[in-house]
């Protein structure tokens, strides 16, 4: 299957999920607003969600897929060895998840106290509500960790659709809870009950996703039986790879943990502003970054297992070019028009215009690092496919150190926007180190042709940015106006940016039949 087709499948379904997620956050802004219960909910939701992305979807998938493919390719189309390996992993994973979840539920008050802001902790009732919501949502981590095992198997078999579609179930569950909560009124009691609905919906969605992915694995002819936990050689090897992969593949999520620690020192509403801004950042990051990272890891693993260096090099070049072709214009557009989008989508109900403007400023800071976050997801698989999980740990550690230093400098001066910029600086540091080490080891190097194409992509994005900068003031009265005015303003901005970028890209020779042909190569 071609890179373009795989990325299209994953990216398309991820786009649907992100759209549902965006609808979820629009409703969330109007029903809960910012501060108080909204901050408590964001904290209760982010803790298991960050753990999920860090351990399950990040480290576990990156470590499991190459080993699964190695067992799979040993016997060609025979899945016997791969199934045995997966069953051994499942047998050990279940008790680990049970013990970890039980400990987390017991110490949840201390965990919440570590990350809660002074304003949230001072409000005893809201803080207690945050603890209860966090305890209700935390089983989501265990359920999704098991679901990720099935997703990794399906991705290894080049069946990407089911795993890419699974997060839609989370957003549908949360939207349902918000719609139910909206009927309870605008008082604090109604918001508290809505928070409880949301917490229950999170864990329920974890069960739905587990059943969904288990069903599609069964439909693909892959079933697993429960066995007694044993530390086999395969499980030990996975464990050795997982621990460093936590840092190598999860730098974005680790930076989110760092953000939570710094947010605890900031005024009320800061965690909500960052969460709402991150939704806009996650649209391109999830659609492009996750799709590319998920699609190329199994293919790179097979190329490297078969000693096909040319195939691995070509695949990496295609992924880098494709990532920048999509993320550079997205980052430039959101940097300039972020406040227009937040005003159009979030303003209303319990979310004020001032809240929307503050969120827009955070969006501009976050997207500075958008291309770097995506490139990290594209470059790290080149190390993991070679079972080298240590190098990404070292680069991520340096990036996180730079992130913390930047936060210490910027947060006291510009608040939550400083958190966004600090993460972006750390991500670019990590990206630069990964690429430098790939070059030094002879694994990958940008050719002159690819570098020239990237330069033209950047020029096309700059032209688009200049046009959007001059066009923004004309829609000022529409961004927070009536519903039809908001829709028209958003469509106008998106259409203008898209037309200008692709027209310039065509003139510069970036987008043509040759580009599409290269991306479609196997």
Image: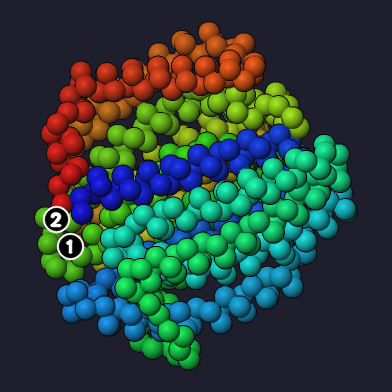
Residue at x 13%, y 59% (from the top left corner): 309
> With respect to residue 436, does 449 lie above or below?
above
Q: Which of 71 and 316 is in front in this view?
A: 71
Q: Which of 492 and 211 is in front in this view?
A: 211
Residue 401 percent coordinates (x, y)? 51, 52
**On-image quarter of the N terminus:** bottom left
Give the tally of numbered discs. 2
User: Is residue 57 among the parts visible in the rendering?
Assistant: yes
> Which of the two discs, 1 and 2, labels the residue nearer the N terminus?
1
> With respect to residue 253, does 267 lie above or below?
above
Residue 377 percent coordinates (x, y)? 37, 51
Residue at x 67%, y 61% (from the top left corner): 137
**Left or right of residue 188: residue 305:** left
Residue at x 61%, y 42% (from the top left corner): 24
- Residue 311: mark in rendering: 2
Which residue is tagged 1?
A: 303
Q: Which of 159 and 334 is in front in this view?
A: 159
Query: Residue 277 appears in which quarter of the rendering?
Result: top right
Q: Nearer the viewer, residue 295 or 382?
A: 295
Q: Find the distance from the CA under tag 1 to the CA under tag 2.
A: 6 Å
């Amino acid at each position: 299957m071609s890179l373009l087709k795989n990325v299209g499948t994953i990216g398309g379904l991820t786009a649907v999920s992100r759209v549902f997620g965006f609808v979820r956050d629009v409703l969330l802004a109007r029903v809960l607003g910012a501060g108080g219960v909204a901050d408590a909910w964001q904290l209760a939701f982010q803790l298991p969600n960050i753990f999920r992305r860090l351990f399950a979807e990040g480290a576990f998938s990156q470590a499991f897929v190459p080993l699964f493919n190695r067992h799979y390719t040993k016997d060609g189309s025979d899945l016997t060895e791969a199934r045995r390996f997966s069953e051994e992993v499942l047998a050990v994973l279940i008790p680990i998840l049970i013990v970890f979840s039980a400990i987390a539920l017991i110490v949840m008050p201390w965990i919440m106290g570590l990350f809660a802001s002074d304003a949230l902790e001072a409000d005893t009732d809201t803080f207690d509500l945050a603890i209860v919501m966090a305890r209700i949502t935390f089983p989501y981590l265990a359920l999704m960790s098991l679901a990720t095992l099935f997703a990794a198997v399906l991705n290894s078999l080049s069946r990407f659709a089911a795993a890419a579609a699974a997060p839609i179930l989370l957003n549908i569950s949360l939207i349902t809870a918000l719609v139910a909560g909206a009927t309870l009124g605008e008082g604090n009691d109604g918001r508290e009950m809505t928070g409880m609905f949301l917490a229950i919906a999170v864990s329920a969605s974890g069960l739905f996703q587990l059943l969904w992915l288990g069903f599609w694995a069964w439909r693909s002819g892959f079933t697993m039986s429960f066995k007694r936990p044993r530390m086999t050689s395969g499980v030990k090897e996975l464990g050795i790879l997982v621990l460093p992969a936590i840092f190598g593949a999860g730098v974005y999520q680790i930076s989110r943990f760092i953000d939570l620690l710094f947010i605890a020192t900031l005024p009320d509403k800061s965690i909500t502003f960052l969460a709402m801004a991150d939704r806009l950042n996650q649209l391109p990051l999830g659609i492009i970054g996750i799709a590319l990272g998920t699609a190329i890891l199994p293919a790179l693993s097979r190329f490297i297992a078969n000693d096909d260096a040319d195939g691995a090099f070509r695949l990496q070049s295609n992924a880098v070019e494709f990532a920048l072709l999509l993320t550079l214009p997205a980052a430039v557009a959101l940097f300039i028009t972020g406040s227009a989008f937040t005003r159009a989508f979030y303003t209303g109900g319990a979310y004020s215009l001032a809240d929307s403007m503050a969120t827009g400023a955070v969006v501009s800071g976050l997207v500075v690092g958008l291309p770097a976050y995506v490139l990290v997801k594209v470059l790290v698989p080149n190390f993991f496919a070679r079972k080298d999980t240590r190098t990404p740990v070292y680069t991520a550690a340096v990036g996180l150190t730079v992130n913390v230093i930047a936060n210490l400098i910027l947060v006291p001066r510009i608040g939550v926007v400083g958190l966004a910029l600090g993460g972006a600086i750390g991500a670019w540091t990590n990206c630069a180190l990964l690429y430098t080490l790939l070059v030094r080891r002879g694994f990958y190097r940008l050719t002159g042709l690819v570098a020239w194409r990237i330069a033209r992509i950047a020029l096309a994005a700059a032209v688009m940015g200049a046009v959007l900068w001059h066009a923004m003031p004309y829609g000022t009265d529409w961004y927070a106006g009536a519903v039809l005015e908001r829709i028209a303003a958003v469509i106008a901005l998106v259409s203008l940016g898209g037309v200008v970028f692709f027209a310039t890209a065509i003139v510069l020779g970036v987008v043509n039949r040759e580009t599409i042909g290269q991306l479609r190569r196997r």
